[in-house]
Amino acid sequence: MAMLKRTRMVKSMVQSLRSYASISVGTDLTVAAPNVSLQKARSWDEGVSSKFSTTPLKDIFKGKKVVIFGLPGAYTGVCSMQHVPSYKNNIDKFKAKGIDSVICVAVNDPFVMNGWAEKLQAKEAIEFYGDFDGSFHKSLDLTVDLSAALLGPRSHRWSAYVVDGNVKVLNVEEAPSDFKVSGGDVILGQI
């Protein structure tokens, strides 16, 4: 009963916040999130050897066709069982449509993202990035407080088709536990 109450509370918070999201079709992500960088998934040793380098958004998006999807967190139910597999299982179809990169991003550190990607055996198909401080998602108004589920500030569940930094298609779920509009099969039909 308490979990059902929390789920309703989270859905209510999400629905009231979604109307204020700054990202929309036509948004240039490199302009909407200036000076924001993401952290490519890697082991701790790789992080040390790279001096904990980050990747500017322009390096991820400019001159490329990218499908990016955000999710509440590594090792969580819907994210692990449905969201990532929906992209991994369709990677050849994305490549056939000329997509340069399929990217998964979450408010996690890059080391957790690396371990999770390896566990899912998805690292060869999908590029995983951490948004360790949530700055990317905050810049786009795609954050949600999931403290009721012991997760704290996280990303909404969403997907986008981005060409040269510009959002061409955007799908945002009504609640973090929903998986209706942000999956790989859905966005494949929108490209």
Image: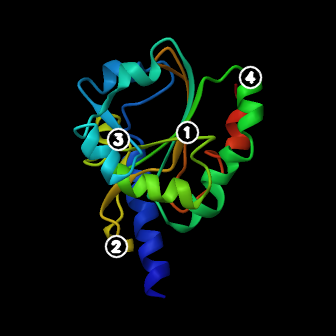
Which residue is under mark 1?
159
Q: Earlier in the sequence, mark 4 or mark 2?
A: 4
In this view, 26 is above or below 52? above
Judged from this view, the residue extending furthest toward the top is 63
**Residue at position x 72%, y 33% from top?**
188
Disc 2 residue type (three-letter): Leu
Mark 2 and mark 3 in contact (Cβ < 8 Å)? Answer: no
Q: Earlier in the sequence, mark 1 or mark 4?
A: 4
Count of all numbered marks drawn on residues in the image: 4
Which residue is under mark 2?
150
Which tag is nearer the camera, tag 4 or tag 2?
A: 4
Which tag is nearer the camera, tag 1 or tag 4?
A: 4
Whole-number angstrom distance, CA of label 1 to CA of label 4:
16 Å
Disc 1 residue type (three-letter): Ser
Which residue is under mark 3?
137
**Residue at position x 71%, y 40% from top?**
186
Disc 4 residue type (three-letter): Lys
Q: Earlier in the sequence, mark 1 or mark 2?
A: 2
Which residue is under mark 4?
97
